[in-house]
Image: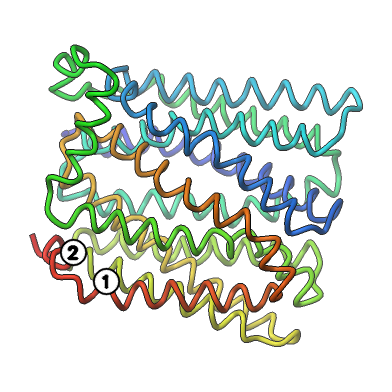
Amino acid sequence: MSNWKRTFAIIWSGQLVSLVSSALVNFAIIIWLSLETGSAEVLAYAAIAGMLPQSVLGLFTGVFIDRWDRKLTMMLADGFIAACTLLIAVVLYLGEKNLVLVYLLLALRSVGSSFHFPAMQASIPLLAPPSELLRIGGINQAIQSISVIAGPALGALAIGIFPIEKVLLIDIVGAVFAIASLFFVHIPRPGKQSEAQKESVWNEIVSGVKAVTSYKGLGLLFLFSILVTFFIMPVAVLFPLMTLQHFDGNPFQMSVIEAVWGIGMLFGGSLLGLAGDRGNKVVLINLTYIVMGASLGASGLLGKDGFIVFVILTTICGVAFTVYNASFTAVIQQKVDPAFLGRVFSMFTSVSLLPSILGLLGTGFLADQVGIAATFLLGGAIICLIGIFSFFVRDLMALGRD
């Protein structure tokens, strides 16, 4: 633990380059789809393609993450994503430009993420003291926010200069940096590794579920987070069309919205990084639900000349999202044995994304029937109510006081 700061500095340096390049490519794809089709359904299908593999595979990948070397797992996942991106870029370069290829690329990247993200989150408690987990979560969010700020601006610039197939190659450079940084760090295996290898995959999945449900209040924390994710996903996918259609915006304004979300994340992550582990994290989580819901709902009430206010509300939502994400992750890392964290994080990803996919399937219909602004208002109001109700659940509140 004595060298944990140096270890994280090395990992974060590689992850920063990788995250910025991925954010650039992801936003370039969004711009390309928005300008090519202008369809809410297409954006929803793209989001589903990027989520479905991760949500299905997440039920099983955590078992193997807890069995395998977590450092090697992250390196192979980054390499797989880079190889798939290169393959699709070559096919697009040869002239096969259609939506199916874009959906396929997003799906393959999701497969790699189903291993990388939970392996990274499960490694953190093995590298740092428990008292620093919230601080590390805040710094992680701050680093991600830099990618959210820089990615849209660079993505808009890149797609304006290069065709989509050349923009994809930038992501490969980022993956190389991420893999290279991991060569210089050591990530230990959790103590129960040898015992875990003796169990069947199904028994390990069950033990991962028990690791959550056996801790009073932890299952409720998962439940409310899943509900919020279910209602926030259909709204989140509409941000580009909200800018383009409701506010009569342009690609530059789309990048502004993405950037200010990142600025909010940077501010929230920096606050957590400076403050450290203080206060009741469950209270923070419930408050962020209310703030995010109120921000999204208020956005739906704005007129066509309210873009500046939309920018401010999006920034506030970015701050709240960072505080929620870092606090939620820190609670899980503190309560669950590190030997089970790969399973817990991957299963949470699955059970939160699967209902969200159902919500996304209705995004196009809802936006067409009631309008994009009304969708923001409805989703925001429900999220806000979930946050208020959470304060009255005794076992959940007790979890934060432990």
Of the pair 252 and 328, the residue shown nearer to us: 328
Residue in the image at 56% along x and 21% along y: 80
Rate crowding at label 1 as few (under 14), some (14 to 19) or many (20 or more) other CA atoms within 10 Å.
many
Callout 1 amino acid: Ser
Q: Nearer the viewer, residue 62 or 35?
A: 62
Residue 235: image location, x then y, percent: 58, 65
* Residue to which mark 1 is pinned: 390
Q: Is residue 138 above or below residue 345?
A: below
Q: Residue at x 32, y 74 (%)?
A: 287
Q: Quadrant of the C terminus?
A: bottom left
Badge 2 element: helix
Q: Please, which colouring scheme is shown?
A: rainbow
Which residue lies at the image location 38% right of the left edge and 27% below the top edge?
A: 60
Q: Label 1, secondary structure: give it.
A: helix
Left or right: 359 as drawn, with respect to 242: left
Circle 2: residue type: Leu
Out of 278 and 93, give the one closest to the viewer: 93
Q: Is residue 113 left or right of residue 119?
A: right
Disc 2 marks which residue?
396
Q: Is residue 173 above or below residue 263?
A: above
